[in-house]
Image (cartoon, rainbow, N blue to C red):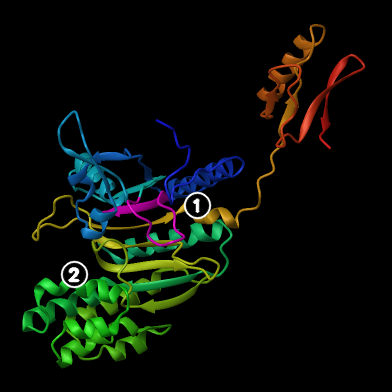
């Protein structure tokens, strides 16, 4: 059988020097998370499917690659999202008690590309706060999200704020009065995500209440008061959500970002239930970071609640904003019997001092394109010379 040495569509290698540049970026971001008091966790790439899909919707199920575990006979999944894994960790370790902060950085795999130019194996870094269902927790997450962007050279990003409570309050009221069939709610959610007013209209029975939902896809802008005036007369839950957004705005630092509100911004895989936020920049075709508040209790039922909030981002998107990596790499030739011991002693000393040295493995090996310097033997001693 002939072996085909190609990667699947949407899956790619990260090679030198970008791979090492990316590793430094990962460390820098994780160091920032830890300085803000978050505990680093590293969940496995694969685990039982039911744990991976806890607190999530059908979209995540479709994006999860599945396999049969030959040891247990149960279905396994390759993670497409890390939030459910952190929910499991919080439940197992703390039993849903107290305020806990977690951070992570690792690859995920999508069963199919999100869009034509998107990778199927992004590298997600993010944070989650459990046990604090307050606007202060949302503000901490948003401020940290903005700090990551600033630290990586993203100038004047656009912060988009929304609130799932607005959609949920309208949707529940529509179902209660019979203007929306309960089985059509997933279709309505998707139509709002796609900002398709025509599809929204087809799912609703005409009424004043339905009119609020119909205009939701286009209810956006820079002024929250304007949006509030357009929602005047909507169910009470809409007003509470708008009030939370006002409180959130008081606690976040947008001095280096532009602000925009979009109450139809239904991010993630459908598990958010409070403020949601995304970070954009004109240089990038999709969100740099996304997050929001959700119920962070594994296998939660209607009577249980473990408030949580967090965000994640694909770190690979930031590589284009980082200056090309040029690090000193010294080439050591093979040497001969008379000077090889002196050569290897010098190599050991240089490496002890933190220098990067690559040693030739034969007399004919030449320095690679990545070598910036080489060791030269002149007048009875080895010295460092700059590559031409």
Outermost residue toward the top in this view: 337
Residue 319 vs residue 65: left or right? right
Please give the name of the residue rendered at 52% of the width and 72% of the height, measured from the top-left corner.
Answer: 255
Q: Secondary structure at mark 1?
A: helix
Q: Secondary structure at mark 2?
A: helix
Residue 119 lies in the magenta-colored region:
yes
Q: Nearer the viewer, mark 2 or mark 1?
A: 2
Q: On the image, which quarter does residue 321 sit in?
A: bottom right
Q: Which residue is mark 2?
A: 186
Please give the name of the residue rendered at 27% of the width and 64% of the height, measured from the top-left corner.
Answer: 134
Mark number displayed over residue 39: none
Q: Position of residue 352 (x, y in %)?
A: 66, 23
Q: Position of residue 291 (x, y in %)?
A: 35, 62
Q: Is residue 195 above or below residue 61?
A: below
Kindly indicate whether the residue at mark 1 contacts the one at mark 2 (C-beta within 8 angstroms).
no
- First in sequence: mark 2 vs mark 1: 2
Q: Is residue 73 above or below residue 179?
A: above
Q: Which residue is mark 1?
A: 316
Q: Position of residue 81 (x, y in %)?
A: 32, 51
Outermost residue toward the front in this view: 1
Q: On the image, which quarter does residue 176 sit in?
A: bottom left
- Quarter of the figure that contains the C terminus: top right
Query: Which contiguous range is marked in magenta?
Result: 110-131
- Quarter of the figure that contains the N terminus: top left
């Amino acid at each position: 059988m002939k072996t085909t040495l190609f990667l699947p569509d949407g899956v790619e290698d990260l090679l030198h020097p970008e791979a090492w540049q990316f590793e430094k970026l990962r460390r820098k971001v994780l160091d920032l998370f830890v300085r803000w008091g978050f505990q680093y966790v590293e969940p496995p790439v694969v685990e039982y499917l039911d744990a991976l899909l806890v607190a999530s919707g059908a979209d995540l199920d479709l994006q999860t690659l599945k396999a049969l575990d030959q040891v247990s006979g149960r279905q396994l999944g390759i993670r497409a999202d890390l939030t459910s894994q952190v929910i499991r960790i919080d439940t197992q370790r703390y039993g849903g008690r107290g305020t806990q902060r977690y951070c992570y950085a690792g690859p995920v795999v999508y069963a199919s590309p999100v869009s034509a130019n998107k990778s199927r194996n992004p590298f997600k870094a993010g944070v989650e706060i459990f046990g604090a269902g307050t606007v202060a927790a949302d503000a901490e997450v948003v401020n940290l999200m903005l700090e990551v962007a600033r630290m990586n050279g993203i100038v004047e990003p656009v912060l988009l704020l929304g609130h799932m409570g607005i959609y949920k309050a309208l949707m529940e009221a529509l179902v209660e009065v019979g203007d929306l069939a309960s089985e059509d709610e997933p279709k309505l959610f998707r139509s709002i995500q796609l900002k398709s007013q025509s599809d929204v209209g087809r799912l609703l029975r005409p009424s004043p209440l339905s009119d609020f939902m119909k205009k939701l896809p286009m209810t956006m802008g820079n002024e929250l008061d304007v949006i509030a005036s357009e929602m005047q007369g909507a169910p009470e839950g809409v007003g509470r959500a708008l009030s939370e957004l006002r409180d959130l705005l008081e606690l976040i630092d947008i001095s280096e970002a532009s602000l925009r509100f979009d109450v139809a911004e239904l991010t993630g895989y459908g598990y958010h239930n409070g403020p949601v936020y995304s970070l954009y920049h004109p240089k990038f075709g999709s969100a740099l970071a996304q997050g929001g508040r959700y119920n962070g209790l594994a296998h939660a039922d209607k009577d249980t609640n473990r408030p949580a909030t967090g965000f994640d981002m694909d770190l690979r998107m930031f590589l284009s904003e980082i200056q090309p990596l040029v690090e000193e790499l010294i080439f050591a030739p093979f040497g001969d019997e008379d000077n090889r011991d002196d050569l290897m002693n010098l190599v050991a000393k240089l490496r002890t001092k933190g220098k990067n040295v690559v040693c030739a493995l034969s007399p004919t090996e030449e320095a690679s394109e990545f070598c910036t310097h080489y060791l030269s033997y002149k007048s009875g001693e080895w010295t460092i010379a700059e590559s031409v």
